[in-house]
Image (cartoon, rainbow, N blue to C red):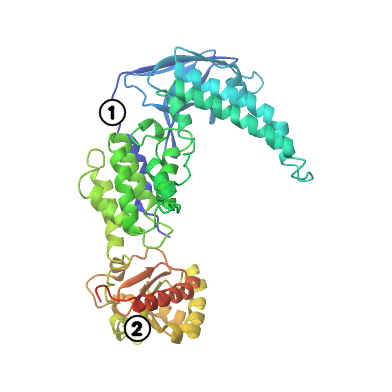
Amino acid sequence: MKRLLITFIALAVTQFAHAQSGYRIDFKVKNWKDTTVYLGSYYGESTVLRDTAKSKAGSFHFDGKTALPEGAYYLVLGKNKLFDFVVGKNKFFTIETTANAADPLKIEDYIKTLVVKNDEDNKLFFDNLHFIGQQSLEAEPVIKVLRDSTLTEDQKKDARASFSKINDRVMAYQNELIEKNPTTLTARLLKVTKQIEVPNPPKKADGSIDSTFQLTYYRQHFFDNLDLADEAMIRLPRPFYQEKVKEYLEKLFVPTPDSVMKAISGIVEKAKKNQDTYKYMVFNLMVMYQAPEIMGLDEVFVRLNDTYWASGEMNFWAAASIKKSMKDYADKIRTSMIGRTGANLIMQDQNLQPRSMYDIKNKYTILFIFDPDCGHCREETPKLVEFYNKSKAQYNFEVYAVSSDTSMLKMKNFMKEFKTPWITVNGPRTYLKEPYSKLYHSETTPTIYILDDKKKIIAKKLPVNKLDDFLSKQQKFEKMKKSQPVKGS
């Protein structure tokens, strides 16, 4: 399988940053010997080492003329991550702590003994960790009871009540922290973890319940706890920003290109207020829709390219090579999107005769692109032969199989081995100006497309075991559509 070029350019997103004043973070770690220590940072799902310092008896510092962007950072000793801390608006502070002399990688000892000087944000951050640690200790015996499979639900009643009280204390503590310190990074980090509370739906004038209210409300308030223009939110230990965007698009909207693009337009507009979040949002949307699980949503990738890359919107950071990679991949998808009329294919069959896909007059055409040496093709082909022999008459389809290998002998042997009863042609032996791979996106094999009697693409990249289900539903849909009265009649 070929790797998409987009995966090789992800690191380039991190290169654009705006300059501010400098920073200096001092550390004093008891029980440390002279060593080298690193400063690490987060970016979405990635981590980056940003700075190096030499520790002398546990004293060291990181500094620079350009201020660190807001976000979560961490210390690295050897190849081991130690503990996180935050960098908010204040870039000059001190952290003092004590390492376990016998085991300097024992992280909980750093947290227990840690003291922050000259930074309220980190004081809040570690106070929260200390509080969570205390509550976790209290919850341990309760959780043990709740996980005991030998106990009845009634016997776990008191444990559930105790656990609920502990959870309520944590929520109350964090809610108070957020309310009293709303602009701190710690508060913003905690806020993004909070769920949106959706009120009960109101009643309409006729007394019925408004069934659309809660979904509409949830959509409108989904990002109340996450400012999409807050660049610190893309530099957290957990990629909340990315996760929230993915949840919003995948769970709250109908999975069609029009619906998804409308939703994307709204959230990108919010992220656009900050160049860092703007580029992060758009780039991650491209990654999200480069190979979507839901059929047809690859069109979103094409539209994103046209809207934000080809238009020049990303020129403030994207190199020409990145833009070209986006365009090239979008163009591969563009010619074979669902709803488009599929291009004709004319190639030589095993008898060296030209065979045109457009000559197929059946209700459906199944385009099957395969490689004779491909292991997965050899698994799928017998299934397709079985489906063909069993269901061709039922659904009125024909298969037009394209071998991607230049060898006619390999193609003939493949046909003989699997007793393929359909039209098989050799892809490279084409009568057209453009190769089939430019007309039908097929970077992996086997790839299947389904075209209707007008040669419009109605499905793509289905596994063979989904063909029966798709064609059955397609026939029912077409029958229902015919039975509906024409508008205006």
Residue at (43% x, 14% y) in the render:
93
Is residue 433 visible from the viewing direction of this image?
A: yes
Q: Amino acid at mark 1?
A: His
Tag 1 residue = 18
2 and 1 marks in contact (CB < 8 Å): no
Q: What's the residue at 59%, 23% (across, down)?
A: 131
The residue at which mark 2 appears reads as 349
Q: Which mark is residue 158?
A: none
* 483 to 60, vertically: above or below: below
The crowding category of the residue bearing disc 1, from other C-alpha atoms within 10 Å (few below 14, some 14 to 19, many at least 20), is few
Left or right of 70: which side holds 334? Answer: left
The residue tagged with tag 2: helix, strand or loop?
Answer: strand
* Residue furthest left in the image: 311
Q: CA distance from mark 2 to mark 1?
A: 59 Å
Which one is in front, 185 or 374?
185
Q: Is residue 37 left or right of residue 223?
A: right
